[in-house]
Every structure is written in C-alpha cells, then in structure tokens.
C-alpha cells in the first residue's frame, strides 16, 4: 500500500452518539419524513427544506429545538410526544444529515429550551392537526353572498 493514499483517522463516534443518531433517524423516518421527505428536501411552499437550511445548522440550536418542541406554521408540537433525549436525537439527526454541518444537541439543551419556551397544553378538543388554535378564526363565508368582483346572478 502507498502511504501517500493514507488518510488520517478522524475521531470515532462514541456509542452514545451513534445511538442518538440511530434514534433520531428512526423517529425522523417514522414521523417527520411524511412532510419533510426523504433527504430532507421538504415540499416547496408547504413543508420546509431541512437539507442545507441555514436555520437548522446555526451554532445555537435554540431555533430548531423550539420549532420541534412547539411547532411552527402547520407543524405539530412534539413537546408532549417526545422526551428531551428523543427531541435531542431528532434535532441532532437533522442538523447532521444531508450535508448539514450542525453539531449535536444534548437532552440538557432541550430541557433548557423546553423550560424557557413551553406553551400551555391545549384545553378541550384538539384541532385535527394537533395545533393550538390562535387568534380569531374567520367566519365561514356566506355562500349566498357573491364574492367581491363576482357579478350578481
């Protein structure tokens, strides 16, 4: 063998880090993949792209942790579904997959963000997509009233 072809050995992932990535990949593959798609490419205009998304890989992972815990837009809240270790695994997997270069996230970081950003649990019946209703819900248009710009019959 030629020594010129030798490569320096990088640090091996610890068993705990390997387990965390496996857990994150498993959860992503069974829950998140439906919206964010294989490869984290999302669906344009509906579900954000996670691959190459600078909001995912910032040095401070608070934004993505908060988003996974409390939802955003049409994304459901996972704070009541997953514990801190599981959220850390999901976030670590997303931050390090598909060319993303964000560092790992710990359960302690998730616990801190959870404590600082926790939303009240919804009361009453949940909405179909599991979101907490916010603001005034617009009334249903009266179908007997023509829309603006529609000629009256």
Image (spheres, helix red, strand yellow):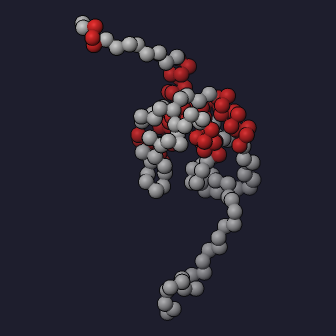
Q: Which of the pair 65/20 is nearer the observer? A: 65
Q: Whole-percent x and y of residue 111?
A: 69, 33
Query: Quick check: 107 left or right of 31?
Result: right
Q: Whole-percent x and y of residue 137?
A: 66, 67
Q: Which of the pair 56/75 is nearer the observer? A: 56
Q: Whole-percent x and y of residue 18?
A: 50, 22
Q: Residue at x 55, y 26 (%)?
A: 20
- Quadrant the N terminus occupies: top left
**Residue 17 visible to the viewer:** yes
Residue 75 versus residue 21 in the image, above or below: below
Q: How many marks?
A: 0
Q: Which residue is drawn at 61% across and 48% down?
A: 71
Quarter assignment of residue 61: top right
Q: Which residue is drawn at 70% across and 56% down?
A: 125
Q: Which residue is drawn at 75% across and 48% down?
A: 120
Q: Whole-percent x and y of residue 144?
A: 58, 85
- Residue found at the far bottom of this picture: 153
């Amino acid at each position: 063998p030629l020594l010129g072809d030798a490569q320096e050995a990088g640090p091996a992932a610890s068993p705990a880090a390997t387990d965390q990535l496996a857990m994150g990949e498993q959860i992503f593959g069974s829950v998140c993949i439906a919206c964010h798609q294989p490869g984290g490419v999302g669906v344009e205009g509906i579900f954000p792209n996670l691959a190459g998304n600078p909001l995912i890989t910032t040095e401070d992972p608070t934004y993505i942790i908060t988003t996974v815990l409390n939802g955003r837009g049409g994304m459901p809240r996972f704070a009541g579904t997953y514990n801190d270790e599981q959220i850390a695994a999901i976030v670590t997997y997303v931050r390090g997959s598909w060319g993303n270069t964000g560092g790992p996230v710990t359960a302690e970081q998730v616990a801190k963000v959870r404590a600082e950003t926790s939303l009240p649990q919804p009361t009453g019946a949940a909405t179909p997509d599991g979101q907490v209703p916010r603001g005034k819900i617009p009334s249903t248009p009266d179908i007997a009233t023509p829309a603006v710009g529609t000629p009256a019959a």
